[in-house]
Amino acid sequence: FQAEDGIRDVERSRGLGDVYKRQGMSGPRIGLNCDVVTQGGKDRVTVPWVYLDAVQRAGGLPTLLPPVDAEGAVAAYLAGIDGLVLIGGADYDPQLYGQSVHPNTKLVAERRQRFDMRLAKAAAAAGAPTLGICGGIQLLNVALGGALIQHIADAVPEALTHTRSGEAERFHEVTVAGGSRLAGVVGAGPLEVNSSHHQAIGEPAPGLAVAARAPDGVVEAVEGTGETFLLGVQWHPERLADRPEHLALFQALVAAAERRR
């Protein structure tokens, strides 16, 4: 994957979005996993609207994938989508990567965890174009055999403050590795990102390469080493979709999904 290929992908997805709007057509179907929240004693599935908006703005058709346990559900979901966004959320059980639970680790619902692990593994095996965001990059790494730092402040000397404070976005720079797939989409070198996480990748999974780091050394992006579009970022580009360099991540995913379909 060359940098100029990534730029062409972004340009192509912009054109696709314009064509779909003019002709009343839908773009490639982009699946999104869902969070599970309990309200009034009842479980509900939710996806923040900004994810759906970013997918639509990039020319894709967002398609929600509720976390069901039915046999064959993941395979059926994957057969019906062209690409995948793995959304953020709480933390995955550290026992999955051989650690005990840190006091600051807040676990996702068990129902979501079971489903997300199956989905991430199956999508990677099927070569589905995938973009993991915040908790989604962590999901990718754990599902493919890597490990996490459970609480950055305790594990990284002189760490930046990566957690969000109230409703205000917190920002810092990351350095995108030259020659990476990510650089082909957003450019190499410094990139301003938002930050609202307390965990990060510790040991990258086999088949994943580090594509960006924060100034304190924390891994901020990984990507697949194969031909499939497989990218995870630790920040939240869906909340920065008004910035072309962040919307470009969704446009590159949509372009890869369009090629696949």
Image (tube, rainbow, N blue to C red):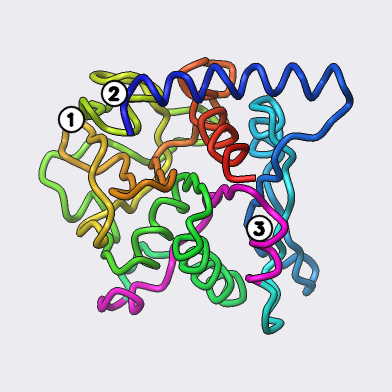
Residue occupied by mark 1:
215
> Tag 1, which secondary structure?
loop
Q: Position of residue 80 (x, y in %)?
A: 72, 58
Residue in the image at 32% along x and 23% along y? 3
Vertical placement of residue 39 versus 99, above or below:
above
Give the label, 3 or 1, closer to the camera.
3
Mark 2 vs 1: CB contact within 8 A: yes
- Residue in the foreground of this view, choosing between 1 and 157: 1
Judged left or right of residue 25, residue 199 is: left
Task: Specify the quadrant of the image occupied by residue 46.
Answer: bottom right
- Residue in the foreground of this view, choosing between 5 and 102: 5
Q: Please state the extent of the stretch shown in magenta in the rendering.
A: 74-100
- Residue in the foreground of this view, choosing between 101 and 128: 128
**Along the polypeptide, which appears first: circle 3 or circle 1?**
3
The quadrant of the rendering that contains the C terminus is top right
Residue in the image at 70% along x and 40% along y? 28
The quadrant of the rendering that contains the N terminus is top left
Mark 3 vs 2: CB contact within 8 A: no
Q: CA distance from mark 2 to mark 1?
A: 7 Å
> Tag 3, which secondary structure?
loop
Residue occupied by mark 2:
173
Vertical placement of residue 105 versus 180, above or below:
below
Q: Residues within 10 Å of mark 2 (few under 14, many from 20)?
A: some
| Circle number at residue 244 | none
The residue type indicated by label 2 comes to Glu
Q: Position of residue 241 (x, y in %)?
A: 58, 23
> Tag 2, which secondary structure?
strand
**Along the polypeptide, which appears first: circle 3 or circle 2?**
3
Residue occupied by mark 3:
34
Judged left or right of residue 193, residue 83 is: right
Residue in the image at 45% along x and 53% along y? 135
Q: CA distance from mark 3 to mark 2?
A: 29 Å
